[in-house]
Amino acid sequence: MLAEGGPPVATWKKLLYSSGSIGSSLAHQALSAYLYFFYVDVSRMAPAVVSVGLVLYSLWNAVNDPLLGFISDRTRTRWGRRIPYVVAGALPLGIAFYLVWVPYTFFGSGVPPLWYFLAVTFLFDFFYTLVVLNWTALFPEMFPSLEERAQVSAWRQLFGLIGLAAALGGAPLIYSSLGWPAMGLLFGGLTALTLGLSVLGAREDPSKRGEDVGLVEAVKLTVVNRSFVSFALTSFLIQLVFALLLAALPFYVKYVLQLESVALTALQAGLILVTVVSLLIWRRLAVAWGPKRAMQRSILLFAAALLLFWFPQSLEGAVAATAAVGLGLGGILLLLDVLLSDVIDEDALRSGARREGMYFGVHALILRLNISVQGLIQGAVLTATGYNAALAIQPDSAILGIRLLMTVIPIAIALAALFALSFYPLAGERLAAVKEALRRQEGLAAPGSPRAGS
């Protein structure tokens, strides 16, 4: 299929661009899943101290993410606005990821100080935002139609699941046998390599106009956009659920199921295999139902499946629960960037500028906040229920707390996300009108477009 407004993007280029999801997912998911566990349970930092560190980390993001997005939108080079940042930042990103997992290099067997935790997480986040924000911002411009967005988003998520599998399933195998520094080195190298190579499949139009207002005004225009506000709240809440589940899963395996860390691999394999299959289905449902309706149904299915985590007493039961969760997860993963791309299209229609950098930057800021909120929620629940890292067997109250972190709490948050999504206005005739008006504004001939959906 032809990309609207430009020559066709070759399939191999779509795949190569999409393969950057391996690196973006690998680094992000490993950090989300193991950062708290590594610094609390392995490095013996107090949960409250790590929670404070995560709050300070979120304040750093309040500056870092929108600022880098704003700078990206205003950049002018012969290679475009986004690609130079991906190329320049890929290697430093890999190095920064490695430094997160090697406090022993500097402090031996002692407890790492808060300043080290802050230094390495701040450095990682700067380069992660620099690279991944610009890589992601290429998506709406490269693929304007719903069919292409659904297709490429599905491929991106398939590659992302490879990164997820490596992060969640491979990490326990590596750190339990070779140590945490080896995991950091291997994952950091893969992150840099895949994101760096992905630009060989990217393209952008250097003539596209970006920001023509100041930073404060640009942020204001973004955060008062009704479509963006409803999307961003939905995305924040649903990805807070992901963060809670990923961070609680090592505790769930170790203390509820009383299994070795390698059992995480079996759980994650079930999740990933079902999610891969469901992506192929949700790609078609997104076009048939429209992005909003498809997202609503995927969230409902996802939330219902989380109930299953309350019951397992064995590895087999837990694998079945994670597999069920994958049925709805595929739709959520596929549709998030599709929904945000529609928001960016609507903004381009109003402003006449392509502001992907600012929208993805503010969105990234909001998503980073969920790491802090996750840390606060998990720290509060574990502390209140009597969790003690020095105990091999936790008290019943702590086991209850871990089960709550896997079921009741994330289900409530997922339902709140569903409520927020009900206010998202870009669906049905309104979405179709935005697409048609944008094509006219950009001087494009209206193709036989896929159904905008409802």
Image: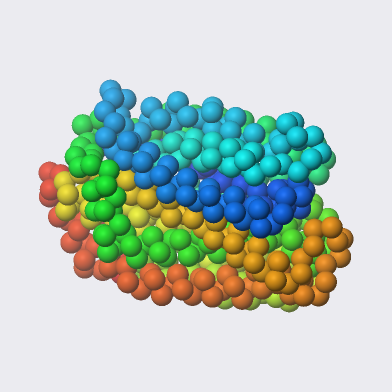
Left or right of 160, for residue 6: left
Which residue is located at x 72 percent, y 50 percent?
Answer: 45
How is colour applied across the structure in the image? Answer: rainbow
Instruction: Tell me if residue 318 comes above or below residue 12 in the rendering.
Output: below
Which residue is located at x 46 percent, y 61 percent?
Answer: 236
Q: How many marks?
A: 0
Q: Could one spot residue 141 in this view of the protein?
A: no
Q: Could one spot residue 386 in this view of the protein?
A: yes
Q: Quadrant of the C terminus?
A: bottom left
Left or right of 202, for residue 179: right
Answer with the quarter of the image where residue 183 lies. top right
In front here: 35 or 51? 51
Instruction: Tell me if residue 405 comes above or below residue 64 in the rendering.
Output: below
Q: Quadrant of the N terminus?
A: top left
Left or right of 419, for residue 255: right
Left or right of 385, for residue 380: left
Q: Residue furthest right?
A: 392
Instruction: Tell me if residue 233 comes above or below residue 36 in the rendering.
Output: below
Give coordinates of residue 371: x percent, y percent.
55, 55
Which residue is located at x 58 percent, y 70 percent?
Answer: 410
Give coordinates of residue 374: x percent, y percent.
58, 60
Which residue is located at x 23 percent, y 42 percent?
Answer: 214
Give coordinates of residue 257: x percent, y percent.
80, 66
